[in-house]
Structure formats: structure tokens, C-alpha cells
Amino acid sequence: MHHPASPVDRLRRAGLRVTSPRAAVLEAVDAQPHSDAESLARALSADHPRLSVQSVHNVLRALTDHGLVRRIEPADSAALYESRVGDNHHHVVCRGCGAVADVACVAGHAPCLEPSDAGGFEIDLAEVVFWGMCPECRATGVVSPNTVESPRRSIRD
């Protein structure tokens, strides 16, 4: 996702101290949405060889806490991060390869869905994950099982 403001400007606006690791991780999340911490650390390793996976986790926590990135946790997956925040969009996950894509809000304005009984809670966000098969997996013949227990299981398991 393209951001009009640089990572440094976004860090400053969020009230975070600008550090090289924070700017680098935020830029990597911009470039590779829906990535986990290990993938981001690998992507950054050439330019930031001293940046450990734990450091990336720490930076991601700070960026999430300050609303600069969103953490999503599809079933059977490591936490994934994206810098598209504030619009209550949802995700679709491929059962075959685990690819993740954004899906616009299901219907209407946030929270997009309303529970029949919210138990007194005031709902402001709904997280919806759609599961299916991406075009590439369908083209290669991966079959999607109808399973509730493990959404990411495929015939390859």
C-alpha cells in the first residue's frame, strides 16, 4: 500500500522516537503487507544485518500499539502485519498456500457486521477472515477440504 507520508513522518506523527529499525520495519511492512516477523527480518537482513527477529517483533509491537500497523492472526498462521490501518477491511486466505489478500468491508460502515447479542459491548470493529482457494492453487489442482477444525489444511497436509 502506498502511503503519502514517509515512514519517518508517520513515526513522528504517532509520537514514536525515530530509529533506523523502526523506519526500516515500517517500510518493509509497506512493501510486503501480510508478512510475519521472520519474513520481514529476512527481507531486512541485507541492509540491517544486526536486526534480529526479536528486535523486529519488538518494533512491530510498538508500531501496532501506536496504530501504524495492524496485526492479523488467521488460524494456523503466525501473526501477520500490514500498514493498511483505520478502514476495517477484512482478509481472504488461501487454504492451499496461505496467501492473504485484502477484502473491502463486508457491507455498510464499520463494524460491517452486527452480532445478535453483544452482551452489553459497544462494537466498533469486526474481523472477518474468508477462506478459499487462490487462482494459483486452483490452477495447480490443490483441493480444498471442507473442514472447520483447521482452515489452512489442504490435501498436501
Image (cartoon, rainbow, N blue to C red):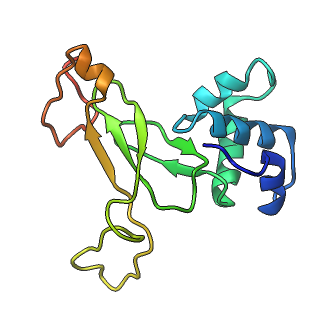
Looking at this view, name the residue that lies furthest to the left. Answer: 146
Q: Position of residue 83 (x, y in %)?
A: 61, 48
Looking at this view, name the residue that lies furthest to the top. Answer: 140
Q: Position of residue 31 (x, y in %)?
A: 64, 34
Quarter of the image with the N terminus in it: top right
Residue 155, quarter of picture = top left
Does residue 64 sit above or below 40 in this rendering? below
Q: Nearer the viewer, residue 89 or 151?
A: 89
Residue at 49%, 41% (x, y): give it: 79
The answer to whether residue 73 is visible is yes
Residue at 34%, 55% (x, y): give it: 128
Give the total of numbered labels. 0
Q: Nearer the viewer, residue 127 or 3?
A: 3
Residue 51, quarter of picture = top right
Residue at 65%, 50% (x, y): give it: 61
Residue 20, quarter of picture = top right
Q: Position of residue 132 (x, y in %)?
A: 25, 36
Quarter of the image with the C terminus in it: top left
The answer to whether residue 157 is visible is no
Q: Nearer the viewer, residue 17 or 52?
A: 17
Residue at 78%, 43% (x, y): give it: 22
Horizontal arrangement in the rendering, residue 57 relative to residue 98 (left or right):
right
Horizontal arrangement in the rendering, residue 80 relative to residue 55 (left or right):
left
